[in-house]
Amino acid sequence: MTLLWWLGTGDCWRCECSVSLDTEIIEQLRQASPSIAVDDAVPSTPIFDLPLPRPKQKSDRNDPRFDFLVQQAMAEPDLRLAELARLTSSTSAAQRLTNFFNSLPAWFVSFLLHLFMILVLALFVYQNRTDETMSLVVSTFLDKSRTAGGIISLDSSEKELADDLRPDGAGLETNLSPRELETARADALELTLDPNPLGTLPALADLRQQLSSGQGSAAIFAARDPRLRQEIVEQAGGTLLTEAAVARGLRWLASVQNADGSWSLAKFDQHTNQKNKGDAAATSLALLPFLGAGQTHEFGIYRSTVTRGLAWLIKNQKPDGDLRINFSGQAGMYAHGQAAIVLCEAYAMTGDERFREPALKAIRFIQAVQHRRGGWRYQPGQEGDTSVLGWQLMALQSARASNLGTEINPDTFRLADYFLDSVSIGGDAPRGALYRYQPGEGDFTQSMTAEGLLCRMYLGWRRDDPRLMHGVKWLLDKHLPSSDSPNLYYWYYGTQVFHHYGGTEWERWNGMVRDLLVESQEKRGKNAGSWSPKACQWGPQGERIYTTSLAVCTLEVYYRHLPIFQPLDLKAP
């Protein structure tokens, strides 16, 4: 018989019956074996049912078989009670573990539980981690629908811009952080956007054909179309950073525009004054890079800026076409030539008839004040110099591209060609290869040589002309751009010369001037995006608007004018 007195039961092995033990029986068992401690709080009913049948009547204790079992158990107290003591005193491993956890602080148990969960999750993540290393799969199966290079898809214009202007070893880009590159992409992208254009852009297929053939005077400005901007920049040698620098320069120029739409050379920093006085030189110089970037009064994020600037020029133009507005000193004819370029380009780019008459009047004024020996200088009718002549010839060339060429007397160009001959005589170089400021005065200089050669290109010289080849080689061998002697005026004209000339000469020049301009642009402060006048020859005279405008126009060379000798190679999309 097994006595489970902590359950208040007794189980018989022979008859397989189970009876309840009351307090009286338990007391008898205690007297039979005093060494065994019996808990007084023994339940009188079983905690759970045993598999053996149990008498339901309390009177079953009077059964003779029950008395026999009790007497037999008491007859062998040592063996049975020892077993009973072992059973009651032993504790299972589960119970010991439960007691251990019950004794721990609640926070420690929570810590162990969370640690276990973290380990489980870590194992799950590790097992599902993908291998990010590049792998190459070679297969003998060939899908005829696939072509070399795979299938490429672009999700947005932003991604297209980032891909087209990828910094493939283009110098400065490799030193920038991913954040700086992303900022540059965002800056460059804004020049291609206009959510609500006022004008209608030409069909893209026709535009590509026109640019590739180089036919028609209007094609000179067609490369400024924002839809082709990225492709042309990449093909011509620009980079993501040159486009970002252009965008930042235009942003600064727009920020210093006067309330009436003009700009001021000497007092640009007083633009917040409602009565600040503008002048033609600053206003024209500021508008040139906006138009060069394809920003007109009909398209671009600077539509309002360009509109107000153009309106100010036209409003203040004199009846005879004179545009030397508030600027009648030594730089007066500089200002007129630059303003005439602006009006001709605005008309050529948009076809807006409101610009036709002001542009024609400006061109007529240029012809009227040309000196009889072919030049122009500070005041109308003065004997000329190469520097002022260059701006007037560029205005006449812009008029040609605007379909206003019929208004130009052919003798105007012949006289200008004669003047250029007069300033290129002397030395060992052939006539026409190198240029000085005025006839017979001073040495040949890089600035006047670059300006003179550019004029000769527009006057009809071909790329294989020995005089042009000699002058280009002289500039490249002896006067490469350098940070030791920055000269934005020279860089502006020299970049145009080499852009038109092309070849390895252009690649060498472009690689130098491009990075110099990007590096020298101010990055911080109220003048961020501009170029300091202190570091440039003639900078103190022209102030910050002068230096910034020339720098931006130089960085726009890739699309500002079509190359004269080599048409663009634009593939159909």
Image (cartoon, grey):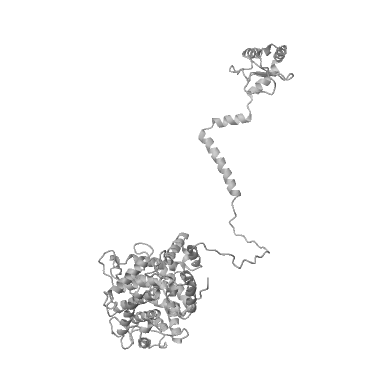
| Along the viewing direction, whichever of 309 and 378 lies nearer the viewer | 309
- Residue 376 spot, x, y in % from top left: 32, 83
Against 185, residue 75 (above or below) is above
- Residue 107 spot, x, y in % from top left: 51, 35
- Please say whether residue 524 is visible from this viewpoint: yes
Is 117 on the left-hand or right-hand side of 32?
left
- Residue 445 spot, x, y in % from top left: 37, 81
| Along the viewing direction, whichever of 25 and 450 lies nearer the viewer | 25
* Residue lying farthest to the left in this orientation: 275
- Residue 501 spot, x, y in % from top left: 46, 80
Corner quadrant of residue 547: bottom left
Against 13, residue 192 (above or below) is below
Is 297 on the left-hand or right-hand side of 11?
left
Corner quadrant of residue 500: bottom left
Against 470, residue 534 (above or below) is above
Q: Quadrant of the N terminus?
A: top right
